[in-house]
Image (cartoon, rainbow, N blue to C red):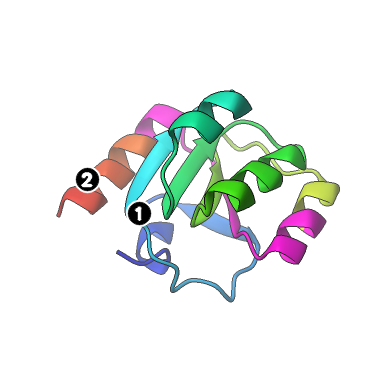
Amino acid sequence: MKLKETVNELEAEFKCCKLLPDRDVSWCYCSDLLSDVMANAKKDSIWITLQTHPNIVAVASLIGLSAILISRGAEPDPETIAKAAQENIPILTTKLPTFEAAGRLYSLLKK
């Protein structure tokens, strides 16, 4: 599936790298613990988190994630957006709680 196919279903908005909607998305990982994401998330996944600081971009870049989705209406720090632009890591936000966003994404990926 492509990243652009997830945006409407997740009620998401691009905060960075809107020009990369054709990235492949193969799975999803939900965690707010950076070391957990580094150990367990898979390449080409969307990472759902509440974290908004620049270190999330470093983790996403290291693993090769397709995008970061910040849930529950949290907004990324300006530094985070700037770093994501440098690293070409799309950041999206949604007002949905993490559980609901993950459930919707799971349904999309299983179709």
Front-most of residues 9 and 60: 60
| Neighbour tally class for label 1: few under 14, some 14-19, many 20 plus, Cα within 10 Å | few
Provide the residue designation for mark 2.
107
* 94 left or right of 80 in image: left
Q: Residue furthest left?
A: 111
The stretch in magenta equals: 82-100
x then y, percent, for residue 98 = 45, 31
Magenta region includes residue 94: yes
Q: For the residues carrying marks 2 and 1, which lies nearer the camera in this image? A: 2
Q: Residue at x 59, y 76 (%)?
A: 19
The dot on residue 64 is none
**Amino acid type for the residue under numbered disc 2:** Ser
Q: CA distance from mark 2 to mark 1?
A: 10 Å
Q: Residue at x 48, y 71 (%)?
A: 21
**Amino acid type for the residue under numbered disc 1:** Glu
Q: Residue at x 36, y 37 (%)?
A: 102
Question: Quick one: label 2 or label 1, which is nearer the N terminus?
Answer: 1
When asked about the image quadrant of residue 49, the answer is: top right
x then y, percent, for residue 95 = 53, 40
* 17 left or right of 107 in image: right
Q: Where does the C terminus fall, quadrant-wise?
A: bottom left
Figure check: 110 above or below 88? above
Figure check: 73 above or below 64? above
| Marks 2 and 1 close (CB-CB < 8 Å) | yes
Provide the residue designation for mark 1.
9
x then y, percent, for residue 11 = 45, 52
